[in-house]
Image: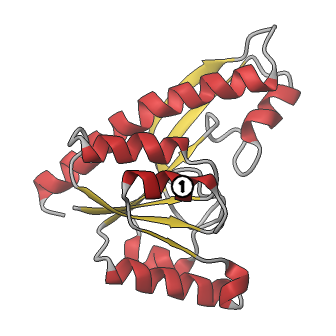
């Protein structure tokens, strides 16, 4: 199973997953990082971990349709079977979904269906919620609306700051995402997908 990870920013989840693939704690082979921000820190992490990467922007491609076609070509060139989104801050469009539907999972920092989209942790905090969470789900054509694979609540404490809450959400992500990916990838490999 040849896996690509898509990320847009700092890349802490990417690094944890990459290390687990390299240590054979996750089944399959991580063969590609795709990043839509050429200056993102995740690229430095990929270089340090010796994970091949590709990076380009929508603007460089002249719009989203051409951008997605270029991504699809990269995925085909690397013979990708499965995609894990880890902080990828774009909606995956139909060009990629048509080829990889059912083979893309996303990590979202909220207990869906609450707080889909951007700034989920901050929105839960400023809305004075008592809990938020982490969701891992398959991607569909909607915004964080695909079938849920796993979820875990994260309590928002009365003395939390945005930073302390973000730290606990990320700790939950770092524990839950590898465990869920291991289960999903193992089942796919056993089925010969």
> In percent of the image, x 64 and y 41: which residue is there?
113
- Colouring mode (rainbow / by chain / secondary structure / one colour): secondary structure
- Badge 1 local density, few (<14 within 10 Å), some, or many (20+)? few
Q: Is residue 96 placed above or below 90 in the rendered structure?
A: below
Q: Residue 65, relative to residue 96: is it above or below?
A: below
Query: Can residue 118 be seen from the camera position used here?
Result: yes
Pinpoint residue 59: horizontal percent, then vertical percent. 73, 83
- Comparing 100 with 11, the one in front is 11
Relative image position of residue 23 (x, y in whole percent): 24, 40
Q: How many marks?
A: 1
Answer with left or right where residue 11 lies relative to residue 163: left
Does 114 sit left or right of 159 as displayed?
Answer: left
Quadrant of residue 35 within the rendered picture: bottom right
Question: Can you identify the residue that label 1 sits on?
Answer: 44
Give the side of residue 81 with respect to residue 40, left or right.
left
In the image, 146 versus 123, the foreground residue is: 123
The spot of residue 64 in percent (x, y) is 67, 83
Q: Quadrant of the N terminus?
A: bottom left
Quarter of the image with the C terminus is: bottom left
Can residue 144 be spotted in the picture?
Answer: no
- Secondary structure of residue under mark 1: helix
Picture quarter containing residue 32?
bottom left
The location of residue 185, given as percent across then percent down, is 26, 50
Most extreme residue toward the front is: 48
Residue 78 in the figure: left or right of residue 74: left
Q: Residue at x 53, y 38 (%)?
A: 135
């Amino acid at each position: 199973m040849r896996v690509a990870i898509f990320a847009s920013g700092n890349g802490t989840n990417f690094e944890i997953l990459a290390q687990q693939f390299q240590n054979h704690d996750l089944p399959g082979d991580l063969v590609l990082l795709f990043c839509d921000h050429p200056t993102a820190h995740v690229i430095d992490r990929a270089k340090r971990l010796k994970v091949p990467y590709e990076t380009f922007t929508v603007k460089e491609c002249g719009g989203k349709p051409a951008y997605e076609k270029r991504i699809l070509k990269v995925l085909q060139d690397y013979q990708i079977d499965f995609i894990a989104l880890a902080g990828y801050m774009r909606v995956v469009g139909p060009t990629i979904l048509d080829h990889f539907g059912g083979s893309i999972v996303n990590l979202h920092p909220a207990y869906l269906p609450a707080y889909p989209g951007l700034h989920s942790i901050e929105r839960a905090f400023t809305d004075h919620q008592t809990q938020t969470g982490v969701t891992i789900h398959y991607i569909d054509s909607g915004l964080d609306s695909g079938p849920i694979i796993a979820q875990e609540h994260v309590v928002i404490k009365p003395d939390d700051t945005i930073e302390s809450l973000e730290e606990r959400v990320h700790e939950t992500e770092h524990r839950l995402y590898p465990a869920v990916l291991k289960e999903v990838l193992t089942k796919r490999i056993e089925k010969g997908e």
